[in-house]
Amino acid sequence: MKMDSQKQVEPVGEPVLDRSRVPHHVAIIMDGNGRWAQSRHLPRVAGHQQGMQTVKKVTMAASDLGIKALTLYAFSTENWKRPSTEVKFLMQLPIRFFNTFVPDLVAHNVRVMVMGDTTKLPAGTQKAVQGALDATKDCTGMVLNFALNYGGRDEIVRATQAVAKRVAAGELTPDAISEELISREMMTAPLGQFADPEVIIRTSGEERLSNFMLWQAAYSELVFVDEHWPDFDGDSLKRALATFQSRHRRFGGLNNK
């Protein structure tokens, strides 16, 4: 069988991936840090620490693949319910991450974006986040989008409130409200044409969205992998994307092409 000359397939031994069909926006629910640590008789925070190293590896792998936007579910609006010691450690991770990784992001032309209610984060965490935003603002390559203190329902409520205020002010009529208008109020709107992820990957074997990108996920392919997040790497990403490429996306239609 003749190979399509436009397809770029990985070398033998690596996951087979068609480079011409790499999704523009990949979102990942990074799950399993605690279970990874507990399986090794380590404290849960050790898993979070290792997970931070995975973020660095996967970010570079995604950038090298030509992905336009990588959204990582780093801290949800529900994660505040965890033990205070764990939450405190999680709030320190962005500081450690950005203090050590921003030069690499700049070198790889990766721009940092954050979605979620960052005003509720500790001052030190907010400072580190803002520093990363400022340091990478001129980068024109992949967008590394962190969901921090983010919840899908909260995002929809905020978008609805913004639209309702415009209606109340007489700027809009209810009949003028459309999907496009609401999408422009979502936290991913700055990503423009790449706002909705083509694929959402969740690690650690769980199969649910956990309040992540509920609006944007309408037609996303969902790929669930058994690896805990600290075990995930560039090859894991390629395997997940190969699974995505094996799917037939019809968007509710019956196109058999």
Image: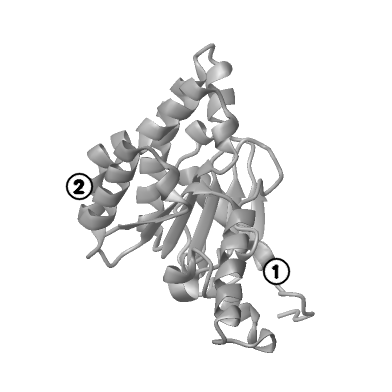
Spot occupied by residue 142 in the image (x, y as percentages of width and height): 35, 62
- Identify the amino acid type marked 2: Pro
Q: Is residue 123 left or right of residue 104?
A: right
Q: Give me the residue at 41% from left, 26% from top.
A: 89
Question: Going by the picture, which residue comes out furthest to the top?
Answer: 41
Q: Which residue position holds label 1?
A: 248
Q: What residue sits right under mark 2 in the picture?
A: 103
- The residue sitting at 28% across, 51% down in the picture is 130
| One can see residue 5 in this view | no
Q: Residues within 10 Å of mark 2 (few under 14, many from 20)?
A: some
Q: Quadrant of residue 56?
A: top left
The numbered mark, 2 or 1, whose residue comes first in the sequence reads: 2
Q: Nearer the viewer, residue 242 or 90?
A: 90
Q: Nearer the viewer, residue 137 or 9?
A: 137
Disc 1 element:
loop
- Report the residue that reaches farthest toward the right: 254
How far apart are the two marked residues, 2 and 1, measured between alpha carbons? 39 Å
Is residue 84 positioned above or below 146 on the image?
Answer: above
